[in-house]
Image (spheres, rainbow, N blue to C red):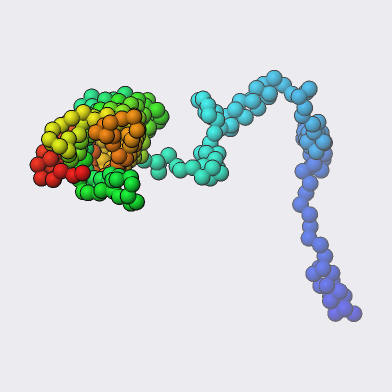
Amino acid sequence: MNLLSSAWLGLWLAWAPPEQPPDDAGDAGDTGDTSDAGDTSDAGDASDELTADPQPATLSNAKAEDIAAARAGRAADAAPAPAGPPYYSAEDMAKLRARYDLQVEAELPEPILEPAKPRWRCLIPDPRCGFGVELLATSAYAYRLRQGDISVDGAYSDWHSFRVSYELWINFPAHVETRGRYKFTRLTLGPKVAVVAGDNQDLWGNFGIAGRYWFGRGEWAPAFEFSSALSFKLTEEGPEDATIRPERSPIGVSVDFGLNVGGWGAIIVGGQYDAPLAREDLPERYRSASAGQIFVGFRGNILWGFPAAAALTTHAVGLRSLPNQP
């Protein structure tokens, strides 16, 4: 029996709950101190207020200090506005260039800040000139033809010859291109007069219109030039006594075009047609047959010397070396 009692007591002690520590509130109650109890009630009230639902903040119940602080914080967080127009960001400009397939400014060539001054005060043509006056000389090979006896079918004479001309062009700007603060001439048009010489002491005069279209703006810019004129014969060599005599002829036409480089000179190709003078009321010696020529040569400004020297040399050598033609 004693053994059973000892075993039961051991089991109860092993499974018994541990002793709790003394309560502060109970001790305070036992000692009669009421200050701690009052503090406990105040803390309970404060916790009740914190756990209660707060009243939502609106503009009606917000204070002026809170509104001013919120505005100041929003202004500080906002990105600074640009100083002036255009109000576009780098991303907006990239989208605009991609939409219209525009180049980036860094990829564009450097602009010409100030072009060089024209040469010889525009006496040599230049795209940087507006109005201009120029003197030209042409030396060319010419293939000439002249109608023979009209009573014979296919009667005509042809021979190899030369053509020399001295021309005056007056250029007016017809189309102008503006680049920044500077203007460049694209197309010039104006009147021209010329004196044309050939073999047999033949001499023509012509007047008409001349033009030049520039493909660039630099010093050596290429250009396409053209001219068209009404021509008339001035003198020829008499067949009987080989003397130079004035020639009365109807109006013909002359046309040429070429590629110019920098206004210095051009390779030209052209042709001329001389209308006949065969009225029955005129004496035989004043009548003239229809004629023409096709020519290829060089035309340039006389100020740099070579075109003038080439024309004078061609004229002198041609008159002395070529035999008289019909």
Q: Position of residue 28 (x, y in %)?
A: 79, 39
Task: Looking at the picture, tell me which residue is in the foreground, 3 or 25.
Answer: 25
In this view of the protein, can residue 209 be seen by the observer? yes
The quarter of the picture where residue 170 lies is top left
As drawn, which residue projects farthest toward the right? 1
Q: Is residue 272 above or below residue 181?
A: below
Q: Position of residue 6 (x, y in %)?
A: 84, 75
Q: Quadrant of the N terminus?
A: bottom right
Residue 281 placement, left or right of 43: left
Residue located at (78% from left, 54% from top): 20
Q: Quadrant of the C terminus?
A: top left
The quarter of the picture where residue 196 lies is top left
Residue located at (21% from left, 40% from top): 163
Residue located at (80% from left, 41% from top): 25
Q: Position of residue 256 (x, y in %)?
A: 32, 40
Task: Looking at the picture, tell me which residue is in the foreground, 123 or 137.
Answer: 137
Residue located at (68% from left, 24% from top): 66
- How many numbered marks are there? 0
Task: Looking at the picture, tell me which residue is in the foreground, 101 or 309.
Answer: 309
Task: Looking at the picture, tell me which residue is in the foreground, 170 or 121.
Answer: 170
Q: Position of residue 253 (x, y in %)?
A: 34, 35
Residue 320 placement, left or right of 274: left
Residue 276 placement, left or right of 236: right
In this view of the protein, can residue 128 be seen by the observer? no
